[in-house]
């Protein structure tokens, strides 16, 4: 059951350059993302070629439109366009391009083709996908991502309309159950990448803990302290984020129980007129169960990694932990250099 995928990420001014560097492949190596194959970089292509850097294009277009901005304004929206790997990876190259062109036309009709500053297809990762970036300038010349994307109900309609557009050409594509019904949030990719980075330093951090004691002084201890000062806040953040993932899964489990109860109540009434409603409920529950299974599978590895990090955190004495979590003073930072 392949799905058509459309996701939005709002970007403030501070995040625009990072998106440009990643999307336009301005780095020689990508240690933080092992899925990127530099050998396949030449296979990437543009459907909309940026005229200049994203940041300059954003500044120029906002200035030309005369839009008012705040420090926390969303100045760009990045759209991820793809489909389930089992579908996308089996499409012939010509059809893959057609898929992205159709998606570009769909988004352009809603946000204004003139507002799209870049649309690049990445073929150098496991699943082909497109990063489409647009500046949310309304026809009234206001900068408003909220107006263009809307609230949760409007975003759900975006997904429905997107599915209708894509499934007209590829009927096998499914429309996943609405997040309004499931309460589902995707586990963010950056959380998996953070887990990988923490894992890579696991042995090094274990060694650092052994190196810190009252009998050990000098450069070796200082190096261990610097490493732990860098690692501990990231590990603490990781643990906090995993707790949020657990809450999301518990909410989804409650949705599943509620759906089962509604079906049981409807079946108990035995009303023939309710047959269609029961069938709809069963379909919905089936999708909720599938989503729940997928989220559990994805989160299992993260939980295991989280337990490892928390075990290490537990070995750090409380007083030292508080010291490591404190901001580094400028004079200490200069001394460390």
Image (cartoon, rainbow, N blue to C red):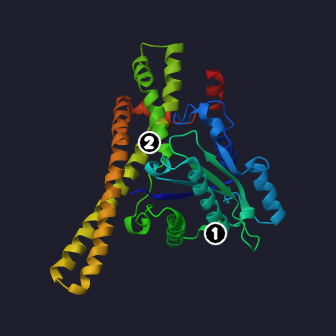
Identified at 65% across, 46% down, the residue is 19
**Residue 270 at x, y percent in the picture:** 17, 83
- Classify 193 as above or below 262: above
Mark 2, other Cα within 10 Å: few <14 / some 14–19 / many ≥20: many
Residue 199 in percent (x, y) is at 43, 31
Mark 1: which secondary structure? helix
The answer to whether residue 12 is left or right of residue 203 is right
Q: Which labelled disc corresponds to residue 148?
A: 1
Residue topped by disc 2 = 238
**Labels 1 and 2: the sequence-earlier one:** 1
Specify whether 15 is left or right of 254. Answer: right
Rounded to the nearest whole Å, what is the CA distance between mark 1 and mark 2? Answer: 32 Å
Name the residue rendered at 50%, 72% in the picture: 153
Which residue is farthest right? 64
Which quadrant is the N terminus positioned in? bottom left
Name which quarter of the figure residue 38 lies in.
top right
């Amino acid at each position: 059951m392949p799905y058509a995928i459309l996701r939005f990420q709002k970007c403030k001014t501070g995040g625009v350059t990072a998106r440009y560097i990643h999307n336009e492949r301005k780095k020689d190596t990508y240690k933080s993302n092992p899925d990127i194959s530099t050998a396949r970089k030449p296979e990437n292509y543009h459907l909309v070629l940026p005229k200049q850097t994203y940041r300059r294009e954003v500044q120029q277009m906002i200035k030309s439109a005369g839009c008012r901005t705040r420090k926390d304004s969303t100045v760009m929206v990045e759209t991820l366009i793809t489909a389930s790997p089992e579908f996308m990876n089996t499409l012939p190259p010509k059809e893959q391009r057609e898929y992205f062109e159709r998606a570009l036309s769909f988004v352009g009709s809603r946000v204004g083709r003139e507002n799209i500053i870049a649309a690049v297809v990445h073929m150098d990762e496991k699943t082909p996908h497109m990063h489409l970036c647009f500046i949310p300038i309304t026809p009234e010349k206001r900068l408003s991502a909220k107006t263009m994307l809307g609230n949760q109900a409007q975003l759900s309609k975006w997904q429905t309309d997107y599915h209708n557009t894509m499934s007209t050409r590829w009927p096998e594509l499914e429309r996943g159950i609405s997040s309004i019904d499931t309460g589902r949030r995707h586990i963010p990719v950056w959380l998996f990448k953070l887990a990988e980075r923490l894992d890579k330093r696991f042995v090094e951090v274990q060694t650092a803990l052994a190196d810190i004691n009252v009998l050990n002084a000098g450069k070796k201890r200082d190096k261990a302290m610097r490493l732990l000062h860098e690692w501990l806040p990231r590990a603490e953040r990781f643990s906090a984020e995993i707790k949020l993932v657990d809450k999301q899964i518990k909410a989804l489990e409650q949705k599943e129980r509620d759906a089962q109860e509604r079906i049981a109540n409807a079946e108990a009434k035995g009303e023939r007129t309710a047959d269609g409603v029961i069938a709809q409920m069963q379909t919905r529950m089936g999708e909720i169960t599938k989503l729940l299974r997928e989220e559990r599978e994805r989160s299992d590895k993260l939980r295991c990694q989280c337990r490892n990090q928390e075990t290490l955190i537990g070995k750090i004495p409380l007083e030292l932990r508080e010291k490591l979590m404190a901001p580094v003073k400028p004079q200490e930072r200069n001394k460390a250099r």
